[in-house]
Image: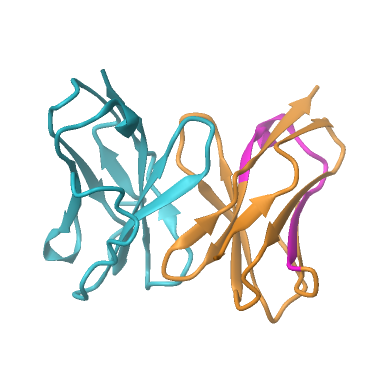
Amino acid sequence: GAGVSQSPSNKVTEKGKDVELRCDPISGHTALYWYRQSLGQGLEFLIYFQGNSAPDKSGLPSDRFSAERTGGSVSTLTIQRTQQEDSAVYLCASSLQGGETQYFGPGTRLLVL
Amino acid sequence: GESVGLHLPTLSVQEGDNSIINCAYSNSASDYFIWYKQESGKGPQFIIDIRSNMDKRQGQRVTVLLNKTVKHLSLQIAATQPGDSAVYFCAEAGNKLTFGGGTRVLVKP
């Protein structure tokens, strides 16, 4: 596609439920990133995928968070047993190579009740 | 540790005037910086970047200045327009981006 796409655009869930967020990067981009943005705040790095290398998971806040990238393209961020503090906008970005300009998707707005 | 921060959280500017957004960084080894614009309800949008071997880079109505001596980055927007109203983030780029807290620019008609 022309840009990074994410789905769903909005997600409301109950505390304790699991959620899956999807990211489709720009075609041909080898690097994919997940960030979290709380209301009125900056962006918090979560995880980074580069080609077939092991992902950099250093930003994941707890073991309830995990992500996969299948076939070097689409990525899924999973949050298990969601908590209210998980409510935020989850942004995905991709870049042609690691360390180059990242292009962001529109984000998924997650609300945990 | 590394950090990238902004001096002003909110900037109110008259339409047609120039805007200057400032950013400080702490990692003197950083060699690549990006400015992003984020409009309400959207993801950050790339505006302009600069590498550490440059002091200045110009785009369309935007200029980024880099002062490595004091580890300071600025974004200048010429003839600010209502469509420039947004939150602006500077970011230090490596494998991941380290973002500043953001500056909200409000353009007054």
Residue at the spot 21% in from the left edge and 44% down from the top edge: A22
Q: In this view, does A37 lie above or below B32?
A: above
- Which color scheme did the rendering employ for the protein? by chain
Range shown magenta: B71-88
Magenta span includes A50: no
Q: In which quarter of the image is residue A17?
A: top left
Quarter of the rendering occupied by the C terminus of chain A: top left
User: Residue A63: x, y in percent?
Assistant: 19, 49
Chain letter for orange, please. B
Give the vertical position of B41 relative to B51 (above or below): above
User: Residue B8 placed where, x, y %?
Assistant: 75, 41
Does B81 lie within the magenta span?
yes
A22 to the left or right of A98: left
Is B83 or B69 nearer to us in this picture? B69
Res A110 → quadrant? top left
Judging from the image, what is the letter of the chain drawn in cyan? Answer: A
Residue at the top extreme, as displayed: A113
Q: Which residue is drawn at 25% across and 50% down?
A: A24
Give residue A96's quadrant in the image.
Answer: bottom left
Q: In this orientation, which residue lies closer to the viewer: B68 or B34?
A: B68
